[in-house]
Image: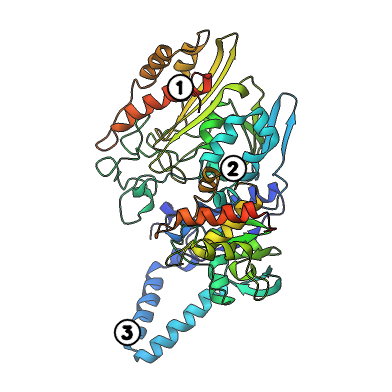
């Protein structure tokens, strides 16, 4: 690993000031950053440790749940407010990584994690995300884990997070601080598609810091489910995952939220499916129709065609469980 | 030298007379090329020292297995390397070194984490427990006893990480069923496949009700 300077941040403003210097990165849990630094994928000159800043709290206020950027994934997943108000988030977090990693990883760090595309990680191979204009190794290479939605000529990588899929479904807002003060961004607008700039995963400016997230209260708690399909039963990235949150009363779906993971460069929200579910009674034929619609526009590569069928079936299964048609 | 592309300010003498810089550099190269190899070696070492000086080591104070340790470490040194190389605590294993196998699992302030992905400087002021800190003198920790009793290992390489994780698994309250144990032990890979016996050992400790 390349040598670097290490400093502890004294305040949020101190972090923002430090980030103005090129080659400076924030470190919190370090579970992805240290990994990438060991492999030479990233080589910052300076790390700003923010772990002791007071940004860990989980609080419920005026119709929303606020979670600080430094709240650990394990703490959030076990938090009683989260479990009661937003069980989908708890389920998604528990589906991710391992207990040791969840004890280190933070909310903000989870959002900022990079793709696990093998071509991004291997510094001897081309990757437009790691080295702009070097080409995409995955497009014509081994692309079994890769995206089927929203890809570009330059990149077909997927975002690896489970937590982010749940947060995208739950209408979360991201609170960001920078030189000009604080700003809020819809979670679904935080990450971006690769387009012509796959080196950028999201819309956070280089001198900005995530302060936390806010999830508005909802009526989804009784009908939420996170289904993750992976190569082994635990501790693996998703081939496909589905986050479902339904508001059902008197046997009718009043409102629905759906997002998929493992299929795109960002959590893939299914807006049309949500509209099509509203006002209907849960049924297998309805869910099959929803899943067919959700796969429109999917584009497979040489090794990931199976994902289209898998994602479709996962949507059906997740809806069946969330609506109570079948047990988990 | 295209300073524009790198967006850096060109050095003064380069701006005034790039040829002079070139001559200085080439004469230095010539001098090195003509010097005896021992002299070159010494010069290189001198340069290394200078580079090292720029990145000064940092003080690290942490409690490891109940003992206060005052160390001097590079910011890039991981807790795992510091434990193994500086403190000779080689129980924590370097399996993958990328946070994928769990062999390096230790407890920081009572929580299980991966020491291979933890920068030592970030552990300053904290308490670390490694596999060496579990036993009380000659008396093994109940989880260590249970791993022996149930044959919870074959080659033994993953075992320190498995045991540190297993202790945490029970303490966290995640050992209520075989399925729960398997899920909450999934961060520890065993290539020998001793999983059924590891699960039995954890269940034994959990059901025994001993304080872990």
Q: Characterize the local packing of mark 2: few (<14), some (14-19) or many (20 or more) Cα atoms within 10 angstroms.
A: many
Tell which residue pokes out farthest to the right in this image.
A61
Give the left or right position of residue B196, taking residue A186 as reference. left
Circle 3 residue: B33
Q: Using the image, tell me which numbered label, if any, was put on residue A108.
A: 2
Q: CA distance from mark 3 to mark 1?
A: 66 Å
Q: Which residue is mark 1?
A: A270
Q: Nearer the viewer, residue B109 or A184?
A: B109
Q: Quadrant of residue B96?
A: bottom left
User: Foreground mark, 3 or 1?
Assistant: 1
What percent of the width, then of the height, locates residue A269? Answer: 47, 25
Query: Chain ID for label 3?
Result: B
Return the chain for callout 2. Answer: A
Q: Earlier in the sequence, mark 2 or mark 1?
A: 2
Q: Residue at x 68, y 38 (%)?
A: A79
Give how far across and how far down residue A166 sits, in percent: 54, 31
- Closer mark to the observer between disc 2 and disc 3: 2
């Amino acid at each position: 690993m390349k040598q670097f300077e290490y400093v502890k941040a004294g305040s949020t403003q101190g972090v923002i000031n430090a980030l103005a210097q090129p080659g400076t990165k924030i470190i919190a849990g370090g579970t992805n950053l240290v990994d990438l630094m060991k492999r030479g994928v990233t080589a910052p000159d300076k790390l700003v440790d923010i772990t002791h800043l007071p940004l860990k709290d989980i609080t419920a206020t005026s119709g929303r749940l606020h979670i600080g950027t430094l709240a650990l994934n394990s703490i959030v997943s076990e938090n009683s407010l989260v479990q009661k108000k937003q069980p989908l988030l708890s389920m998604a977090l528990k589906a991710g990584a391992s207990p040791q990693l969840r004890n280190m990883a933070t909310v903000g760090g989870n959002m900022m994690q990079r793709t696990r595309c093998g071509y991004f990680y291997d510094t001897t191979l081309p990757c437009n995300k790691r080295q702009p204009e070097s080409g995409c190794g995955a497009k014509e290479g081994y692309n079994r884990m890769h995206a089927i939605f929203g890809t570009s000529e330059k990149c077909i990588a997927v975002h690896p997070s489970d937590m982010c899929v749940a947060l995208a479904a739950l209408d979360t807002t991201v609170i960001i601080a920078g030189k000009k003060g604080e700003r809020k961004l819809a979670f679904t607008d935080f990450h971006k598609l690769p387009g012509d700039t796959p080196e950028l995963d999201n819309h956070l400016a280089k001198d900005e810091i995530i302060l936390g997230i806010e999830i508005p209260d909802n009526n989804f708690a009784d009908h939420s489910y996170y289904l993750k399909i992976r190569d082994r039963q635990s501790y693996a990235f998703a081939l496909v995952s589905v986050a479902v949150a339904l508001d059902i009363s008197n046997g009718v779906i009043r409102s629905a939220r759906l997002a998929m993971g493992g299929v795109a460069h960002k959590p893939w929200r299914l807006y049309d499916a949500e509209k099509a579910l509203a006002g209907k009674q849960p049924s297998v034929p309805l869910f099959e129709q929803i899943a067919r619609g959700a796969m429109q526009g999917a584009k497979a590569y040489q090794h990931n065609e199976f994902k289209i069928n898998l994602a479709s079936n996962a949507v059906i299964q997740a809806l069946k469980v969330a609506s109570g048609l079948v047990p988990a | 030298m295209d300073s524009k592309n790198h967006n850096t300010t060109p050095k003064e003498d380069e701006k005034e007379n790039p040829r002079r810089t070139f001559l200085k550099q080439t004469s230095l190269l010539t001098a090195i090329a003509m010097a005896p190899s021992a002299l070159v070696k010494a010069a290189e070492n001198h340069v290394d020292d200078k580079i090292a000086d720029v990145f000064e080591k940092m003080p690290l104070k942490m409690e490891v297995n109940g003992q206060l340790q005052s160390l001097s470490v590079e910011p890039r040194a991981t807790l795992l390397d510091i434990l193994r190389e500086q403190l000779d605590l080689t129980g924590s294993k370097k399996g993958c070194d990328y946070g994928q196998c769990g062999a390096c699992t230790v407890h920081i302030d009572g929580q299980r984490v991966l020491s291979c992905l933890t920068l030592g400087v970030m552990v300053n002021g904290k308490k670390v427990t490694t596999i060496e800190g579990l036993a009380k003198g000659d008396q093994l920790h109940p989880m260590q006893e249970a791993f022996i009793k149930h044959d919870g290992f074959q080659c033994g390489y993953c075992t320190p990480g498995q045991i540190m994780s297993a202790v945490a698994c029970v303490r966290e309250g995640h050992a209520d069923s075989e399925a729960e144990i398997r899920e909450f032990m999934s961060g520890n890979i065993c290539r020998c496949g001793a999983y059924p016996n590891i699960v039995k050992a954890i269940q034994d400790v959990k059901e025994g009700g001993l304080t872990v």
